[in-house]
Amino acid sequence: MRPCIVITYPFPIGRATGGARMTREIARNLGKLGADVILLPVSASIQRQFPRPSVDNGFLGFEFDDELLKDSVSVERVTQHPLNMQLDGLSVRKTLKKILKQRHVDMVLSYYHEAAFLPSFLKSKNIRFGYISTWQSYEWALNSYKRGGPIQNFKKKQVNLRFIIKPHNQADILFATSQFTRDELINVVGVDGSRVIVCPLGVESKFYKIPRSQPEKISNFIFFGRIVESKGIVDAIKALGMLAARGFTDWNFRVVGQGNHEWARNLANEHGIADQVSVYGPFDDEKLEHELKRAHLAIMPSHSESFGLSIAEAQAAGIPLVAYEAGSVPEVVENGVTAWLAPFREVKQLSECIEGAIRDPKTTYQAGLAGRKRVKEMFTWEKTGEIMFEGIQKVCLNGTVKGVA
């Protein structure tokens, strides 16, 4: 009998983000392994304003529906809650109730706040519940309440308890995308470690097809991901400013992703490198592949990662990296072989890593090839799907993840 797995996702699956790509690939590979998968992405705006603006249809991912259906994945889009993102879980539950009137569901997998209203409801229906744990850092998320006043801190702490801690502890199974995240789930969130399975993510095969040739000089740098401070864009621009101040100016840095583009441009201006830094919104697959083809070095000093899908994708494209030794990054790259890692927040050392890559084009190029080989061997969506499918089967049949590696 084919298990029916529902995967909820708090954002549209058509956005050019690692999370959207990840969700589509997890669903696709579970379908290939014999599950009927129903994908429930929320058509949620990322803008925090009231009333919540609607999302342009171009971001909702309709172009993927027929392709996903070939692998037994259907898509049921969830309308965002009109008031607040944290209430989107109510809309998810409402949509799930409609599905249950038509068919049986064995397991529901969720990511974030969209699962907050599911655990008790699913338990009443004897449906298993799990998380795909991909938070950049649970410690950051749960301790952010300490930055405000007493009343603000109390409210934030209660929200964390209701929307993060309790649902995670009610899950039958949690798939941590790295050992780093597994440790955070146990030590920060308080989850029983016996229910947590390390399940690294994969990389789409198209990244391996991006051609590479040895450059005469290392001059084309790239950052792709969310343009926010926690992804290290400030550190990258500061490091490049230091590099330029030392006389290394024959390079360009292209920043691609969602976020405050004007803020990033202003940062480059403050550090005297505005003419060398270009900032773009999210690219479609074809444009991103073109950018990765021309890039010689990826500079992605994230402050933490649960896996770092963009970091793995850069390596799969044959691009060496400069990053921080933070979060799961040391699990995804091999320091000194496929990447150069600086100690966290040591911007000067980050800058020196970039300089080292520039000074030795041959070694830098070979590091990119080594990264491509390593990722291809270690991180595939087929492996991700197999680990998840085995865990889901164990839980649905036995009510426990015992025996799953």
Image: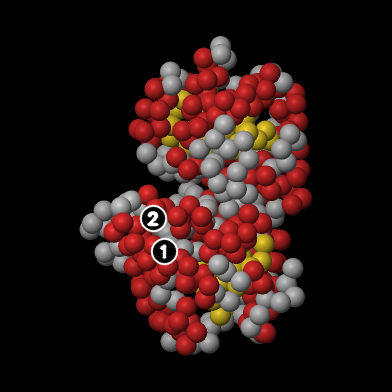
Type of amino acid under label 1: Asn
Horizontal placement of 351 versus 121: left or right? right
Q: Position of residue 173 (x, y in %)?
A: 60, 73
Type of amino acid under label 2: Tyr
Q: Tell me: residue 4, above or below residue 132.
A: below
Answer yes or no: is residue 351 visible.
yes
Q: Position of residue 213 (x, y in %)?
A: 71, 28
Q: Are marks 1 and 2 in contact (CB under 8 Å)?
A: yes
Secondary structure found at label 2: helix
Q: Residue at x 22, y 58 (%)?
A: 51
Q: Residue at x 75, y 35 (%)?
A: 337
Going from N to C along the chain, the mark reached first, 1 or 2, is 2
Q: Quadrant of the C terminus?
A: bottom right
Secondary structure found at label 1: helix
Extreme top residue here? 247
State the residue position of label 2.
145
State the residue position of label 1.
160
**Residue 194 circle label:** none
**Depth check: 143 or 89 in front?**
143
Q: Position of residue 219 (x, y in %)?
A: 60, 21
